[in-house]
């Protein structure tokens, strides 16, 4: 499987009144995993993608989330054990890519996926915010991380 992994500590404030991690926190987990993978390169694996998607140049290409779908498969209880966000590229287009994720409960005895998600990302020009084609170098950095797309219950 061509997946990269990002480990994240849960925060006390991620919980809701029911004592489990709130659904809003999951969107933040996805965002943090994307930043660590595509900008910082601070996941478990060095992917090579971070060199092409940093956005350091204000006029250079940027990644924008066009849509996001999250399916919650289990309740995630607060724990001192970190979760793991596994992510990969499920689909690659001319100026877009789909980042697919599984969020794994680090406190579970066996691998337990608590949510799966897909973010549709569009690469845009930093000045005009209009879609631009993914560069050949950027495309080459992404291709090793393409894997089987997730199947969601809806959509």
Image (tube, rainbow, N blue to C red):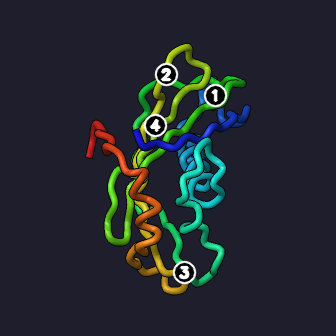
Q: Residue, x 61% and y 41% (percent of image)? A: 44
Q: Which residue is mark 3?
A: 126
**Rendered image: mark on residue 101:** none
Label 1: how many Cα within 10 Å (few below 14, some 14–19, many 20+): few
Q: Is residue 59 left or right of residue 90?
A: right
- Select label 1 or label 3 by which is in front: 3
CA separation in Å, label 2 and label 4: 11 Å
**Rendered image: mark on residue 102:** 4
Residue 60, placed above or below residue 122: below
Q: Which residue is mark 1?
A: 17
Whether the residues at callouts 2 and 4 have beta carbons within 8 Å, the answer is no
Q: Residue 29 in the image: x percent, y percent?
A: 58, 44
Residue 15, placed above or below residue 29: above
CA separation in Å, label 1 and label 3: 40 Å
Sequence-wise, the earlier of marks 1 and 3 is: 1
Q: Residue, x 43% and y 33% (percent of image)? A: 72
Q: Residue 43 in the image: x percent, y percent?
A: 62, 46
Sequence-wise, the earlier of marks 4 and 3 is: 4
Sequence-wise, the earlier of marks 2 and 4 is: 4
Sequence-wise, the earlier of marks 4 and 1 is: 1
Q: Residue, x 31% and y 45% (percent of image)? A: 149
CA separation in Å, label 4 and label 1: 25 Å
């Amino acid at each position: 499987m061509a997946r990269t992994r990002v480990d994240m500590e849960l925060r006390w404030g991620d919980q809701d009144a029911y004592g489990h991690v709130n659904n809003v926190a999951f969107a933040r987990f996805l965002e943090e995993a994307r930043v660590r993978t595509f900008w910082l390169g601070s996941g478990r694996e060095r992917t090579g993608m971070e060199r092409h998607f940093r956005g350091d140049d204000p006029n250079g290409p940027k990644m924008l989330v066009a849509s996001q779908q999250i399916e919650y498969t289990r309740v995630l209880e607060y724990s001192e054990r970190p979760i793991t966000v596994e992510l990969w590229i499920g689909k690659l287009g001319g100026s877009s890519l789909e980042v697919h994720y599984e969020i794994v409960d680090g406190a579970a005895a066996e691998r337990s996926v608590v949510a799966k998600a897909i973010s549709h990302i569009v690469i845009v020009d930093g000045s005009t915010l209009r879609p631009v084609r993914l560069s050949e170098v950027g495309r080459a950095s992404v291709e090793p991380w393409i894997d089987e797309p997730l199947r969601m219950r809806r959509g």
